[in-house]
Amino acid sequence: MKSLPHLRDTETCVSPWPTLANLFACLLLFVMSTVTNNLQAQTYTDRHDFNCQTDGCGATYAGIVAQGRDGNLYGTLPGNGPGGGGTVYTITPAGAFNVIFNFNSAGTDGYGPSSGLTLGIDGNFYGATLTAGANGFGTLFKVTPAGVLTTLHNFTSTEIGFPYGPPVMGKNGIFYGVTHYGKAWSITQSGNFKLLPNPTPGDSRAPLTAASDGNFYGTTINGGTGNGTVFQMSTAGKIKIIYNFDNTHGAKPIGPVIQGSDGYLYGTASTGGSIPNAFGVMFKLSTKGVITVLHEFDSTSTTDGYEPLGGLVEAVDGNFYGTTYTGPGPHGHGVLFKMTKTGTYTVLHIFDTATGWVPATTAMQNTNGIIYGETLTGGFSFNGVFYSLNAGISPFVSLVGYPAASAGKSFGILGQGLSGTTSVKFGTGSATFNVVSDTYMTAVVPTSGTTGTVTVTTSGGTRKSKQVFKVIPMLKTFSPTSGPVGTQVTITGSGFTGASKVTFGGVKATTYTVDSGTQITAIVPAGAVTGKIAVTTTGGTASKGIL
C-alpha cells in the first residue's frame, strides 16, 4: 500500500491524547475557521464525512470522481472499509452515500483503489487498484453502478504495475493509461490488454487527458531534466516530452493536465516557482511546449494557500477551479480557488478541521453546475469529507466518451431535466434522440451536423455541452470517377456542412458548392493530377478513390 501525503506535525487536533491547551486551541480554531468560512464561502457544503471503518478513507491522487447515467457521483477510496482494502462508492449530489463494492484485505480483487473512476460508453465504470491482485502489482477493473466488479487485468512484474490513475478513453474507443513506474498500456472494454512500446519520461501519479488532436497528455513527477515533465502520447504509444519543468516555472506536477476550451493545456505543479517562498504554480502550456505561469503560490501568504496536489477543472463559466493541499500560512489546511484564463486568482473557501481539510484529489463538475471533490482528512471522524461548491454556474450537458464521430454514430449525453427534451443539435444540425431517463439520453450524430457544442433544448431551458464535438466528415462516392480539367464532380458522404476545402490529387478546387451535409459539387481544377479527392471541414479531412 502506498504512503499517503505527509500530514503536518502541527495538527494537534487529531492527536489521540491531546493536552488541555491543545483542546482549547482546536476549539478556538474551529470557531474562527467556521466564522471565516461563513463569511468567505457561503456555497461550500460538507456533503458527507467519510468513516474509515464503514466507508473507506484516504482520498488521494488520482481520486477521479465520475458522474453516472443516474446523475449520481461515483468514486473510490483506497484505505480501509468493511473489507479492509478500500471501497467503491456512490453519492448523490445531495450527499446520500453508499458503498457499492469492498476490496478485501487479502487483495484477491486488488488493493488500494486510489485511481477513482471513468464512465464508459456502456454505462459501467473503469478503475485501477494500486497493488495486490493475482500478481501483486495491481489491477484494472470494471464495476457496474450496482457494484458488480470484474477484474479486467492483473499487472505482472514485467509490466511493473502500481497504476494511480483510472483508464481514459481515446478517440478509437479503447482505454489508455500509465503505471506509477512509467509503463504505458491500453485495454479494451472487454479486457484485451496491451503493453505499449515506450515508457513515460518518469513516475506518474496522474491520469492521462485525451486532447482534441487525438493524442493523450500526461505528467510525471520526475524524469526529463529532473523536475518533472508534461508528455504527449499517441494511441500507438509513441511518447515525447513537450515540456521539462525547471523549478522556476514549477516542479513535480502530481495532478493531471487538462485541455481548456481554448486548446491550451492547464495544470498545476506541486512545488517550485520564481518568487521568494514559492511553493507551486498554476500554468498554461501549448501543445508545442510554450509555458505561461498564471499564478505562483506563496507559502507565507496569509490568504492564498500553496502546494497544489490535485489538477484543475474547467467549469462551463470558462474559469478553472482547484485546490491547494496546504495554507494559507505555514499551518493551514488548504484552499479551494478559482482562476481565470488571464491569471486572476480568487480564494473561494479555506478548508478547516470541521468540514474537511488537506485536499489531494482533482475536483469535478457535475452537470447540475456544482463542483464536487474530496479531502484527505477532517470532518466528524477526521477521515476526510466529500464536499460541494455551488458557484452559481448554470447546468449543462456532458458527452460520454471521446467527443468526435462521423454521422450515424450514437452518443450518450448526461444532464439534468432531460425528460422534457424537445431538440438536440450537433453544431447546427438537428439530431434524432432517445431520452432514457431524466439524467441520461442518447442522440445520433446527424449528416447535417457541424463541429461545435451539442445543444439540448428541454422544457426547463437550453443546455450546452462542456465539450466541443467534432463531426468527422466521411467521403463515400464521387461521380464521374474520372475526367479532364473542368469536369463537374458530385461528391457524396456526410459531415460536409461548412466544408472549407476540396482537393483533387492534392490540388485545391477553386470552385465547389456544399449542396448539403451529404453532397458537394466541385469542378476539377487546373493542375489537378490523378489521386484522391479530399474534403476538409473543421471536424477533419476525408478522402477516397482516384480521379
Image (tube, rainbow, N blue to C red):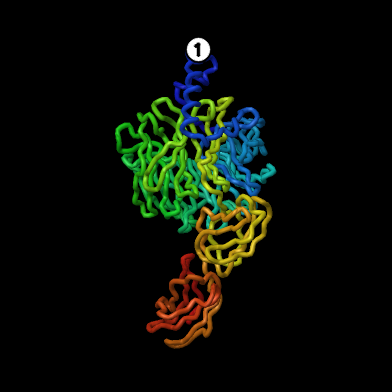
Percent coordinates x, y for residue 537 in the rendering: 47, 68
Of the pair 511 and 183, the residue shown nearer to us: 511
Instruction: Relative to 319, say whether 50 is above or below.
Output: above
Tally of marks:
1
Which residue is pictured at 45% across the width and 53% down the height? 261
Q: Identity of the amino acid at label 1? A: Thr
- Residue 245 in the image, given as x and y percentages of width and height: 35, 43
Residue 402, quarter of picture: bottom right
List x then y, in percent, for residue 179: 50, 44
Res 143 quadrant in image: top right
Q: In this view, does 192 lie above or below 108?
A: below
- Residue nearest the observer in this picture, 155 or 257: 257
Q: Mark 1 points at which residue?
A: 19
Pick whichever, 228 or 383, lies toward us. Answer: 383
Note whether residue 374 is visible: yes
Residue drawn at (30%, 33%), measured in percent from left and top?
276
Identify the residue shown where x is 39% and y is 27%. Answer: 329
Quarter of the figure with residue 85: top right
Quadrant, the N terminus: top right
Could you say where residue 186 lies in the image, as x and y percent from the top left?
A: 54, 52
User: Is 491 situated left or right of 109 in this image?
Assistant: left
The answer to whether any part of residue 163 appears in the image is no
Q: What element carries label 1?
A: loop
